[in-house]
Image (cartoon, rainbow, N blue to C red):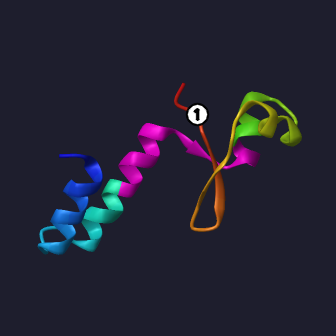
Amino acid sequence: MNLNNLITNCVESGNATNEQMVECIQLLSDYLCLTTPKEYAKSKGIKFQSVYKGKKPISILGKKFIIDND
């Protein structure tokens, strides 16, 4: 069973609370090392424009993030 199906089954069966789903989002964010492009540039000591040359941003709820779990 893949992660999408597992989450869907838990939510549809009522076995996942809002708090648990928020915890999952936070956990996944931690594993992906999600940062905003501005935070990423600052942490790496590079110019903001350089972020987009090396990493492709992803969009979540209209906000851009960089995955930095390499």
| 58, 29: nearer the viewer | 58
Horizontal arrangement in the rendering, residue 29 relative to residue 47 (left or right): left
Q: Position of residue 50 (x, y in %)?
A: 85, 35
Q: Relative to residue 32, is residue 40 drawn left or right?
A: right
Question: How many circles with numbers are drawn on the protein?
Answer: 1
Is residue 48 part of the magenta span, yes or no?
A: no
Q: Which residue is mark 1?
A: 68
- Lateral position of residue 58 relative to residue 27, left or right: right
Residue 20: x and y, percent? 25, 63
Quarter of image, res 56: top right
Q: Is residue 68 left or right of residue 40?
A: left
Residue 9 x %, y %: 16, 64
Q: Position of residue 55 (x, y in %)?
A: 70, 35
Stretch in magenta:
25-39
Mark 1 Cα-neighbour bin, 10 Å: few <14, some 14–19, many ≥20: few
In the image, farthest residue toward the top: 70
- Magenta-drawn stretch contains 33: yes
Element at badge 1? loop
**Magenta: predominant secondary structure element?**
helix
Picture quadrant where residue 30 is located: top left
Residue found at x 78% / y 37%: 51
Tell me the residue at 17%/46% (across/down): 1
Residue 45 image-quadrant placement: top right
Q: Which residue does the image show at 67% across and 49% down from the upper left? A: 36
Q: Residue at x 81, y 33 (%)?
A: 53
Tell me which amino acid carries mark 1.
Asp
Is residue 64 positioned above or below 21 on the image? Answer: above
